[in-house]
Image: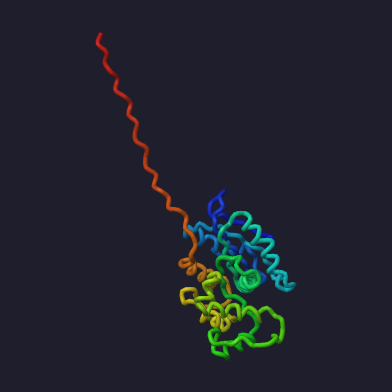
């Protein structure tokens, strides 16, 4: 996977890195064009940004998790980043979740914007059961090996404060008119209210940009140290000449 690093301070790496994963057929540079990186800088966060060219083909051939881990996560840890957050839109949000599912404990936080969460029939089973809090994971072998059969039971852990404490904090944002909104609502009901953000509209950049700015107001990201005011240097006074008696 190709990556593009955007430093919070030119020439100096921060301790925190935001890894941006685009949606299907979107380009990583669109995060910058749509103001995502600028919003981070405006708030004076001490966090660098990494734009990842996570093409949808990685999902088609089921290599996304390994490529993200080996090409992005491990090298950035080796580069010295202590905190790594994944920020994913649509299928990029799905990628962030399945990475943590497959590689638990390697990420410090996840932000999903309008994430794809799997097939509608699986979500319909959960809806019929009254939501994630009351849904019972079916016993026996699953009817197929699609990853959403494992993802929803993993997401169910967020309904328990004790289990959620061992997982990376998860934030969700979505438009109420999004075509995936019914699935998003299932996840929203399992998360703390302060971790869920909604807006009017559907599945597009205006909604995602608005949600991202709202979420930045609560995300536990480090701030740059306050700059001390520069005090003016004391004025220098030349000594008066001393008269010498003749």
Q: Identify the residue at horizontal 65%, vertical 65% (top origin).
A: 27
| Numbered marks: total | 0
| Residue positioned 50% across, 70% down in the render | 210
As drawn, the residue found furthest toward the top would be: 246
Of 48 and 105, nearer the camera is 105
Q: Quadrant of the N terminus?
A: bottom right
User: Nearest the camera: 203 or 116?
Assistant: 116
Question: Is 111 placed left or right of 239 in the picture?
Answer: right
For the rendered model, the colour scheme is rainbow
Q: Nearer the viewer, residue 53 or 126?
A: 126
Whether residue 141 can be seen here:
yes
Image side of residue 222 versus residue 204, left or right = left
Q: Is residue 173 visible?
A: no
Q: Identify which residue is drawn at 57% across, 72% down.
A: 112
Please identify the residue farthest to the right as the structure is shown: 61
- Splitting the image into 4 quarters, where does residue 139 fall? bottom right
Looking at the rendered image, the quarter that the C terminus falls into is top left
Q: Quadrant of residue 106?
A: bottom right
Image location of residue 40, percent across then percent down = 51, 61
Query: Horizontally, is 238 left or right of 115 in the view?
Result: left
**Residue located farthest toward the bottom when viewing the structure as drawn:** 128
Q: Can you give x and y, in whole percent of width and height, for residue 195 in the image?
A: 49, 73
Residue 208, horizontal then vertical, whole percent: 55, 71
Nearer to us in this view, 47 or 69:
69
Q: Relative to residue 205, is residue 225 depicted above or below?
A: above
Measured from the top left, where is residue 216 in percent x and y?
49, 66
């Amino acid at each position: 996977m190709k990556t593009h690093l955007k430093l919070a301070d030119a020439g100096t790496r921060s301790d925190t890195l935001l890894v941006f994963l685009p949606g299907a057929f979107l380009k990583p540079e669109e995060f910058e064009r749509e103001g995502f990186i600028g919003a981070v800088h405006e708030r004076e966060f001490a966090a660098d940004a990494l734009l990842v060219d996570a093409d949808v083909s990685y999902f088609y051939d089921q290599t996304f998790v390994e490529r993200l881990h080996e090409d992005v996560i491990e090298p950035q840890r080796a580069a010295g980043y202590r905190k790594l957050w994944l920020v994913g839109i649509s299928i990029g949000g799905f990628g962030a979740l399945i990475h943590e599912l497959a590689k638990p404990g390697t990420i410090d936080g996840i932000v999903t914007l309008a994430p794809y969460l799997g097939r509608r029939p699986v979500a319909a089973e959960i809806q019929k059961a009254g939501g994630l809090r009351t849904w019972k994971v079916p016993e026996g072998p699953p009817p197929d090996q699609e990853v959403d059969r494992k993802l929803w039971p993993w997401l169910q852990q967020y309904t328990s404060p004790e289990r959620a404490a061992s997982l990376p904090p998860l934030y969700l944002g979505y438009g109420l008119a999004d075509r995936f909104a019914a699935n998003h609502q299932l996840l929203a009901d399992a998360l703390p209210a302060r971790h869920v953000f909604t807006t009017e509209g559907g599945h597009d950049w205006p909604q995602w940009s608005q949600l991202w700015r709202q979420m930045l107001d609560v995300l536990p990201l480090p701030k740059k140290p306050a700059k001390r005011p520069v005090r003016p240097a004391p004025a220098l006074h030349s000594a008066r000449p001393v008269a010498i008696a003749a």
